[in-house]
Image (cartoon, rainbow, N blue to C red):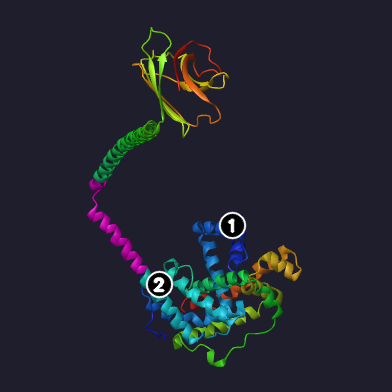
Amino acid sequence: MTNDATPRNLLPAIAAGDTVAVADLYDRHGSVLYALLLKILGDRPDAQEVLQESFVQAWRRAADFDPRRGSETAWLVSIARNRAIDRLRSRNLRAIREEEAGREIPIDARSVDTDGGAERQAILGELRERMQAALAELPEPQRSVLELAYFQGLSQSEIATELGEPLGTVKTRTQLAMKKLRERLKDLGWFDDARRV
Amino acid sequence: MMHEEYEELAALEAIGGVTDEESRRLEEHCKGCSSCRHALDDYREAAAGLAIALPPVSPRRDARDSLLIQIQTEAVADSRVAEATEDAAAMRRRTIPSWWSAAAAVLFLALFGWSELRLRALREELTLLETEKNAVITENMRLGNDVQAARSRLDTIRSANQLFRLAASTSSTAASANVFMDATHRRAVIVFTDLEQNDEAHSYQLWIIRGDMKPPMSAGVFDVDADGGGEVELHDMPVDVPIAGLAVTLEPRGGLSAPSGAVLLQGKA
């Protein structure tokens, strides 16, 4: 359980050899990363395994984290996503996921994260709502290419094939989606708050 | 590539939409372009927002313990490896000064060179001893054979039941021979004395003078030493041939099927 006295970024302490700080890092970000891994992998044991691998990698590479380049959350999310996409590709789980398309991973209400500090949870909740609002403002085709790229790890060419659209159209659509998202999140003050959690 | 194009690339990079090469070029550009670097950081943060937008899910409780155990274990292992590496390096620094290393190398080379030379000498000595050993074995075998032959001759002489003498055909030579013949076992020993030493081109040839008036048959060839002495041992003398006596001629080396030279010695059985 983290509290308000816990430093904003735990990674510098971890880089300095504080293995106990890994527990705080896990409490702080575990539920976000696990939700992402479940979304990508669609399989709890796989997600659990990649989650552990991701935190071990974060522990080993903590010195690489540069707080000037982004938030601790974004850095960890990037590690977890990359590992999950690698796992997805290596196990060729895409076909399985296609069969299961539309089926949501059931979320046990008791498993919803309540750890990580009350204030932080409140900020995270606000960030989530603002992000969901920003995504909802995107046209569906733009939101769709973002999700295919981010959650399924498809390349721009694969998305073009998947959607039956020219590659140039897919690239332009993706760039427009990201640009709009960035502008909207900036308007919402999202980036400053994201770097606080 | 134009500045705007890098910004567009940054938007794609944040969600994994570029190749490794494009990613590398973008990072390179961002090192010198704060605007693009800022855009890339924002896009990455926004992409992470896609994860934050998901309803959070707590992992299993025991997963946290499992992670911490793994990290503690790896941390201890890492520190032990680091300590061991440092200890080894310190030990080398403390106990083996550089001049020691050089001296050890020289000593090693000297010992190596000396041992190589010593080894070579021992090998040569071994080869010599092997040669000598083979010579001794050969000599031993030869002496053994001589002893065997001497015993055989002694047996023949002891068991001889006919003794007769071969005498020179002319009075110009004192050459003679004593014949010890064991008629029972069809064997004989003939001991020659005072024969003139034969040269390389000739051999003395012993002939059996047959009692049936047929031409003499060869009983073998022999040489004599510088003193004119020599011995011949005959085995398996023909059973069906009546032996009237023996004779000796000088023939071309190796002998002939019939005598061609003058009879030098002869005697009746």
Tell me the subunit letter for badge 2. Answer: B
Direction top: furthest residue: B172
Q: Which residue is mark 1?
A: B21
Tell me the subunit letter for badge 1. Answer: B
Q: Can residue A90 be seen by looking at this rendering?
A: yes
Q: Amino acid at mark 1?
A: Glu
For the magenta stretch, what is the residue range?
B78-101
| Image side of residue B155 versus residue B215, left or right | left
- Residue A32 pos. (x, y %): 53, 81
Q: Nearer the viewer, residue B223 or A177?
A: B223
Q: Of marks 1 and 2, which one's residue comes earlier in the chain?
A: 1
Q: Can residue A189 be seen by looking at this rendering?
A: no
Residue depicted at 46% across the width and 73% down the height: A56
Direction bottom: furthest residue: A110
- Up the image or down, A14 lies above or below B136; here it is below
- Up the image or down, B200 lies above or below A28; here it is above
Quadrant of residue A35 within the rendered picture: bottom right
Q: Which label is found at residue B74?
A: 2
Q: Nearer the viewer, residue B60 or A29?
A: B60
Q: Amino acid at mark 2?
A: Glu
- Up the image or down, B229 lies above or below B65; here it is above
- Residue B163 pos. (x, y %): 40, 25
Mark 1 and mark 2: Cα distance apart in space? 34 Å
- Residue A72 pos. (x, y %): 47, 74
| Image side of residue B213 versus residue A72, left or right | right
Q: Which label is found at residue B106?
A: none
Please state, as top left, top right, bottom left or bottom right, where the N terminus of chain A lies in the image: bottom left
